[in-house]
Each structure stands twice: as structure tokens, then as C-alpha cells.
Image (cartoon, coloured by chain):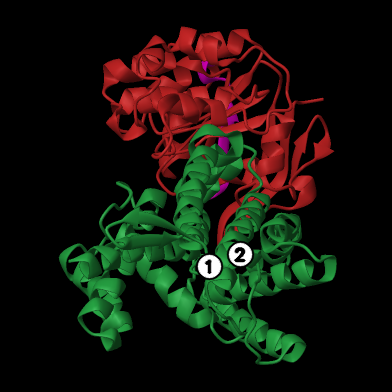
Amino acid sequence: MPLLETRNLTAFYGDFQALYGIDMMLDKGETVAIIGANGAGKSTFLKAVAGLIHSAADSVLVDGAPIGAKPAAEIVKLGIALVPEGRRLFPSLTVEENLRIGAYGRKMQGPWTLDRVFTVFPVLKERRSSATPTLSGGQQQMAAIGRALMSNPRVLLCDEISLGLAPIIIADVYAVLPQIKAEGTSVVLVEQDIVQAMRVADRVYCFQEGRLSLTGRPRELTREQIHRAYFGS
Amino acid sequence: MTGWLDALIEGVLLGGLYALFAAGLSLIFGVMRLVNLAHGDLIVLAAFVILVVADRLGLNPFVAVVIAFPILFAIGFALQHVLLNRTLGPDLLPPLLVTFGLSIIIQNGLLQLFSADSQRLRSGAIETASIPLGAGIAVGVVPLLTLLSAIAVIVVLNLIFYRTLIGRAFRATSDDLEVAQLMGIDHRRIFATAMGLAFVVAAIAALYLGLRANFDPTIGPARLLYAFEAVIIGGLGSFWGTLAGGIILGLAQTIGARIDPEWQILSGHLAFLAVLVIRPRGLFPRALD
């Protein structure tokens, strides 16, 4: 049984349909990348899984149990954590408080503690008392990932964690993924940076205008296939 | 000279009362961006709750208020959970309309139950007791307790906001409602807890409202106005700013009254206007709002 599964997942913004029947599966310890152009529905997909956008009860399953209708605050307690697009740290909380609040509703036992996050991102320990708006973009992204890890998630959903960062900083941020995977955490990466995504992912899903246009293992997919799935033919 | 000094002291002490009126309003706005138009009436409602508890159980109002705390916390929690949470959203109008309606309902409900007669909380000798400061100046014990209570309330609210888990959740929810939910924070519960807390603060304000002067079911909206002015003068989102705002308002009123008794209320409003013109965001706004 997959750890996380979506079955015929649809999502709407008012009258606008953003997702059309997405089927996805994620096994324990697996890293999956979702790629696609702007507006393809990648972020919407993560938000629907995390409970920020309403979806049908049986369209999202964790360990086979339907969770689609649950609110976001309950879904994180089932071990699904989202690193939102644009980091969205809490500006009136310090770095340490941002990390600690990640464990606010923690129900899952697991390896991630404040000390562990500080070991993985030493710079956050140095800046623990700082206001988050004073951090660099890379540091903010590390804090956002650390905050999500503090809930000890079984699935970490990452929305565009490389967006707006310099390549060398992106490498720093991505360097933590092996450590997260080593703890048995599954990862879903939403990325516009296809090369980065293909390098770390076990499997790739490509979205196009709210529909699944391609899925497969990175090594088995050809350039042409991806190009067609990404941009349409 | 003594008269002016007296006016200054009186103004600062009066400011304590206004800060107490305003603290609950500031708390609610800070956590959920809700402008509670029923806040003044809630203070009057709390005064009646204290009155009933004191009368029925034959207690001093200072004891009665402690018994009223859990009752008012529960009313506040339930009000937010059952009613006000449904009105919150991207549109600012529904909560304004609903709290305005609530204000009318509370006023008329209290009129029905208690009539329009003036009421007062009685606490015996302390009401008229004063402490002489020399040079012909004395401060009343109740006004002094009002200011000290206001300071205590601000200190405790700051401790709750900056030193506790629930306070961290208050700030996170205020910063970013959506991401707060991703942290496992049930925002409806957080809002209800904040409203319960605001009711407890309103109870403290109500205690001094009832000890210092007569009250009746219709005086709520004027208290709301003072509370609102104190919050705006101080700057949204800062509890110490709210205390400063209350004191500035109190000072403006007593100084105005010293010049001409008819100017008391007007000079408070003028001070409010002056601050709005010079610092539209208030004197101590929170940096990020």
C-alpha cells in the first residue's frame, strides 16, 4: 500500500477548475518530483494534499485511509508537512520560534528535533534569535524546511524551494535532501528547475494545464517526451 | 500650579482606565484583525455579570470579578466559536456588521433584564479612600488601582504573547493564517481562546468602570470610542502602545477640563485627531503591519 496516494484528485478556485483527475502514488522513502510550466497546477496539487484547498474525501489517501476532507491543521498531524511557496516564515517570530512552532501540533514521534535541525542547518543556530525578515533568501528557505521537519513528517511536500535563489544556494538547500531521505521521509518536490528535480527524484510527474501529461523514472524519459509533456505539442 | 499637577496625575490615572477598555480591543484586533464594535457593550455586560455575582453571593466586587473570570471567558470563547468565526474571511464587512448587531442586542438585552437604572459596584471604604502626596495633592486609591491593574494587564498580555506556546500561536496566526494551519494550529480554537481572554480583560475594565462611576446598559458605545482612540493613538498591535494611547487620551481630557470643564471630552478627541494627522499609524505601530 502506498504511503500517500491521490485518486482522481480535482481542485477548484471558485468556478475555475485547476486540477483534473490527478492520480499519484508515493511510497515510503521515495522522492517524487512534479514538474510543469507556470499555472500547470503543481502548487494547487500540494495545497490540496495539505488540506489548504478543499478536495473530495476519498481523493487523497494516507496508508489507504481517506483524508481529503480533513482541514490542514489535522493533516499535518497525520505526517504530511508542506514547505509553502515563497517560504512564508512568520515575520513576528524569531528563527527559533518559527522552528518550534513547526512542532506545535506534533503527534508523530521521529528523528527531527530543534538540535537536529540546527545540525543540518548550522546557520540557523547562529541566527536563532534573529527576526526572519533579516535572513537571506537561502537562510529563509532553510528555516522554512526546518520548520516543516519539526513536525516529524512522513511526507515532506516542497513547493519551489529553489525559486529566487542563486545556483550555489540552491545546491546548499538541496544538499539536505539526502539526510531527509535517510530518515525514511518521503519527499514530493514541485520544481520549475527540471534539471535539479530530475537529479534527485526517483520518479517524475509532469503536469500540463491541470492534467497529468507524463510520468516515469527520470532515466527512462527522453528529452522529447518531457518537452512535449511540459509545453504541449 | 497645584491644580495643573493634580490634572496631570488625574489624567495619567484616567488613562489607566482607558487602557483597560482598550486592551481587549487591541488583543482581538492583533490576533484576528477583527474590529469588535461590541467591545464597549461587552465591558458593560461584564459589569452587570460582576454586579449579579456580587449581589447574589454577597461578595466584594474585587472577589466577584475573580468568580466572573471563568464565566466571561466561557461566554467569549463560545461567542467566537459559534458566531464570530463564521464571519471572518477576506471581506471585512461581515464581522463589522455582526459585532454592530451584537452591540444593539447586548444593550437591549441588558435594558430588558436590568432596566435603564444606573447601577454601581459597591466596595465600601476603598471607594473614597485616598493617599495624600503632600502639597495638597492626593490620589484616590481606586484610580491608582486602575492604573496599576492596567499595567499588570499589559505585562501579563505581553508575557502570554511572547513567552508561552499559545502566545506564539497567536502571533503566528496573526502573521499568516494559512501557514499557521499547516503547523497544526486550529485557528478557530485560537481565535476563540483570544476572545475568551479579551472577555477576562473586559471584566477587569468593567470592575473599575463600575467602581468609579455609575453605569447603565447604554454607555457601551462611548467606552468603545475611548478604547478605539487609545488603540489607534498607541499604534495597532502594540500593548504598551495601547497603554500609552490610553494615558495620552486621559491626559488630554483632564488638561482640557482644567482649561474649561466643557472641553474635557472634546480635547480627548482633538488629541486623537492630532496623532492621526502627525502619525497616521499611531505612536508605536508594530513594525510589520
- What residue span does the magenta drawing correspond to? A210-219
Going by the image, does B136 lie left or right of A213?
left
Q: Picture quarter containing residue B41? A: bottom right
Q: Position of residue B23 (x, y in %)?
A: 48, 58
Q: Position of residue A122 (x, y in %)?
A: 40, 10
Q: Are marks 1 and 2 in contact (CB under 8 Å)?
A: yes
Q: Secondary structure at mark 2?
A: helix
Crowd tier of the residue under label 1, counting other residues whose Cα lies within 10 Å: few below 14, some 14–19, many 20 or above: few
Query: Please, is residue A205 above or below residue B15 in the view?
Result: above
Q: In the rendering, what colour is chain A?
A: red
Q: Is residue A218 magenta?
A: yes
Q: Are marks 1 and 2 on the same chain?
A: yes
Specify the subunit that label 2 lies on: B
Check disc 2 and give the amino acid type.
Ala
How dense is the environment of label 2, judged by Cα within 10 Å: few (below 14), some, or many (20 and up)? Answer: few
Name the residue at 57% across, 47% down: A211
Tell me which chain appears green: B
Q: Is B13 above or below relative to A65?
A: below
- Residue A149 visible (yes or no): yes
Element on which disc 1 rests = loop
Question: Which residue is painted at 54% across and 48% down in the image?
Answer: B178
Amino acid identity at mark 1: Thr
Q: Quadrant of residue B208?
A: bottom right
Give the residue number, with chain letter if any, for mark 2.
B125
Residue indicated by mark 1: B128
The N terminus of chain B, quarter of image: bottom left
The one nearer the camera, A102 or A214, is: A102
Whether residue B255 sits left or right of residue B250 in the image: it is left
Residue A196 image-quadrant placement: top left
Please say whether residue A15 is visible from this viewpoint. Answer: no
Question: Horizontally, is B149 left or right of A186 in the view?
Answer: left
Read off the chain for label 1.
B
